[in-house]
Image (cartoon, helix red, strand yellow):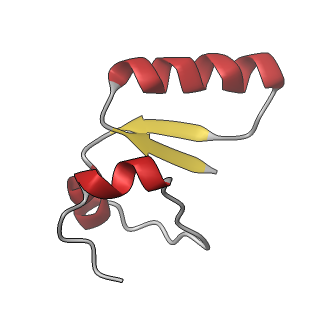
Amino acid sequence: MTGVDLSSKAIAQANALKHALGLDAQFIEADIYRFGQENTQQHDLVFTSYSTICWLPDLTL
């Protein structure tokens, strides 16, 4: 799993939970638009919660 968030505090919390639970995951602090342009890795699924939709004004469905 790969998690992306703009907040360094959110990434730090995610990494703390990852280590506490022994999860196989990576969490990246990045602007999602830049991440989408710079990251060439393929992903099977992209999830965003309803509370983030307002932060993605040009989201194409």
Please say if 38 is above or below 8. below
Q: Is residue 30 left or right of residue 47?
A: left
Point 25% across, 51% down: residue: 55
Measured as percent of width and height from the top left, residue 19 is found at 72, 20
Quadrant housing residue 43: bottom right
On-image quarter of the C terminus: bottom left
Please, is residue 16 above or below residue 43 in the view?
A: above
Q: Considering depth in this image, is 59 or 36 the residue closer to the camera?
A: 59
When the figure is inspected, residue 40 is found, relative to residue 22, above or below; the finding is below
The percent position of residue 39, horizontal first and vertical second, equals: 34, 61
Q: Image check: 38 left or right of 8?
A: left
Locate residue 33, reporting x and y percent: 23, 58
Residue most toward the bottom?
61
The residue drawn where x is 57% and y is 39% is 26
Residue 6 percent coordinates (x, y): 30, 36
| Residue at x 54% of width, y 18% of height | 13
Tell whether 41 sits left or right of 29. right
Seen at 27% across and 72% down, the residue is 59
